[in-house]
Amino acid sequence: MAEAKSRVFSGVQPTGNLHLGNYLGAITRFVELQDTHDCLYCVVDLHAVTVWQDPDELTRNTREVTAAFLASGIDAETHIVFNQSQVPAHAELAWLLNCVARIGWLNRMTQFKEKAGKNRENASVGLFAYPVLMAADILAYRSTHVPVGEDQKQHLELSRDIAQKFNTDFARAIARAGHEAEFFPPPEPLIMGPATRVMSLRDGTRKMSKSDPSDLSRINLSDDADTIAKKIRRAKTDPNALPSEVEGLAARPEASNLVGIFAALSGRSAGDILKQFGGGPFSRLKDALADVAVDVLTPIGAETARLMDDPDHIDRILSRGAARASAIATPILEATRDVMGFVRAPHRR
Ligand code: AQP
């Protein structure tokens, strides 16, 4: 890959089963962007360990996210697929950026507050610094665009603030070395598509999430047809009939979520779906949604399972991707070190 004008980077944590929210909010966008951008897609295992992970599970989940990427249509030949821990530039740049980011900025991150909960003193330092590592992931490649779900918007804004502060703090050294003033281009979030925030099937006010204790709250990409249909049939609804117009979905989070998922999976508009199912019971919508979800998701689950039968193949893809990612990140990291004034060996200048 040559030095690109616009480069996409995004990551997914290997912290458990990928679910419909990850698929619609992130992975389908990753696939689309391959036609127009140079893309790096990363299994962010260093992020995963900000919360304790069973080592065997971490290995398995890392391979499984990779397999799900490939099964969903990510092309690891044309683009770069790798796991974060194999490219040391992420961790080193994160340290440098930890010294640029301000504690006050991190204190405002709502995801830390949600994940740390009441027992904040007992959360790992890594969980607190997580958004700085995310900034490093993105800036290590001077990525210009980052497709994410709605929940990552605040972290992306922080990455932009860190990039801008670095560019300002080291402006003179950046100019002296002949770099562009935007040494780190502030990355643009790409929060796009009809399902940027897929909600839990058990509570339409909470995000669908891997860490929700109820498996009925989410559709996993690994679920079989019967499980998908069962989860949709048991999804929480309200007692009223479906509205016939989109405006009628306001203040009805469960109805809105099911219609949104239907629209995203089928490529139809919410208005069109409500024209067909409005006025009727939820069960009609749920039956049709189950059919669409099974059609879209079960081939991905089957292909993921097939790829998981050959872990060596997956590991080869990841290590080759890591070598290609390193080739981009290493000169950027070296330029960062130079701009900050770190001494290097004479033969490496
Ligand atoms: N419910 C969602 N709707 C839309 N997009 C979502 N994403 C996650 N949940 C939804 C997007 O998926 C990408 C990868 O997410 P991640 O694995 O890095 O971490 P996460 O956002 O913390 O995902 P989870 O499932 O909620 O994990 P846990 O439970 O471990 O916190 C991101 O682009 C994210 O926006």
Image (tube, rainbow, N blue to C red):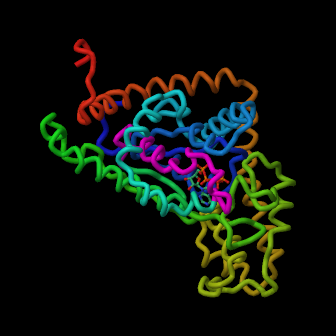
Residue drawn at x 52%, y 48% is 130
Please, which residue is most extreme toward the top here?
Answer: 347
In the rendered image, the vertical position of residue 322 relative to residue 119, given as above or below: above
Residue 320 percent across, percent down from the top left: 51, 23
- Along the horizontal axis of the image, is 125 left or right of 345? right
Who is closer to the viewer here, 293 or 44? 44
Q: Which of the 4 image quadrants contains residue 178?
A: top left
Q: Is residue 149 magenta?
A: no
Residue 278: percent from left, percent from top: 72, 83
Left or right: where 199 falls relative to 32: right
Image location of residue 136, percent across then percent down: 42, 42
Q: Which image quadrant: the C terminus?
A: top left
User: If the picture is divided into quarters, which one holds ligand 1?
Assistant: bottom right
Is 59 left, or right, of 163 in this rendering?
right
> Principal SS element in the magenta part?
helix
Q: x and y percent of residue 274 in the render? A: 67, 79
